[in-house]
Image (spheres, helix red, strand yellow):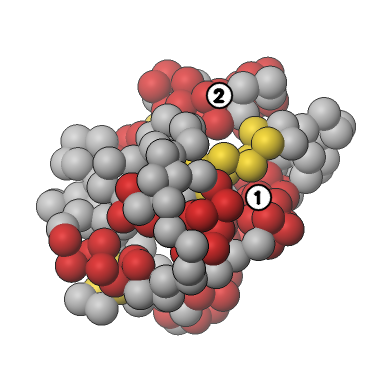
Amino acid sequence: MPPLITPKVETDFCDPHVCKRCADQGSTCCNLEPGEESECFPISEMERERILEVIGSDKGGFVQEANRSSFVENMKRLFPKEGKLIDQLFPGAKFHLRLATRTDGSCVFLEADGCGLPREVRPYYCLLYPFWVTGRRLTVFLSSGCLVVNENRDVAGVLRAMDMTDAEVRMLHGRLRLAWGLPPEEGMPLLEQAFTRYKKTK
């Protein structure tokens, strides 16, 4: 999970092909460096079930990953004012689910022409990237490999290029928070943890 920073170059138009252009240049946000798999974002049970409804079976798409301290610290960086909640949701003796990756670090759902999952069932983190919301502030992840970030100088430019609105990003972020077990907005009370509890598979 890369750091959060506002980028510094600008484009004034929507570019529906920016992710394809990015993929043509090399690694994308669907690739991890081999060895960094344990730092991958978590998948909630709700998100997993939504994907399974489409692909029909597990097909090796998910991996159980221990809640290592480095993963928990990354989560706390994403939610800097909610460290205690993160500790409750991802205790050190437990585990979480993530998307499976191939030996080269690419997501198992990544195909030659992009993500093999229909957009409506992709994990919320995938739908949000490169955007994030911290408190009330909309920002983007600093990623040297993300073309839309490199080509735009500010969040407004990235929104235009991705053909997204501020409201859409905040809605997706709220849904991600709920799926991961957090309240829909920072500062709200913790809700029943229905979607982040996994049954450990054999």
Q: What residue is rendered at 43% in x and 58% in y?
A: 11
Please identify the quadrant where the N terminus is shown: top left
**First reached walking from the N terminus: tag 1 or tag 2:** 2
Could you tell me how far apart the alpha carbons at marks 1 and 2 are, in whole angstroms? Answer: 16 Å
Is residue 4 shown left or right of residue 103? Answer: right
Identify the residue position indicated by label 1 in the image: 173
| 123 in relation to 92, above or below | below
The numbered mark at residue 13 is: none
Q: What is the crowding at mark 1: few (fewer than 14 residues within 10 Å), some, or many (at least 20)?
A: many
Q: Closest to the observer: 89 or 151?
A: 151
Q: Secondary structure at mark 2?
A: helix
Label 1: which secondary element: helix
Where residue 20 appears, as percent x and y from the top left, is: 29, 71
Q: x%, y% of residue 151?
A: 35, 53
Occupied quadrant, residue 114: bottom left
Q: Is residue 50 visible?
A: yes
Residue 199 pos. (x, y %): 55, 49
Q: Is residue 99 visible?
A: no
What residue is at 59 percent from the left and 65 percent from the top? 164
Q: Amino acid at mark 2?
A: Lys
Q: Residue shown at 43%/39% (left/top)?
A: 7
Left or right: where does residue 173 sit relative to residue 103? Answer: right
Q: Residue at x 33, y 36 (%)?
A: 38
Give the residue number, with chain letter if any, for mark 2.
Answer: 76
**Left or right of 116 in this view: 101:** left
In percent of width and height, residue 48 lies at: 52, 62
Please, what is the three-letter code of the amino acid marked with disc 1?
Answer: His
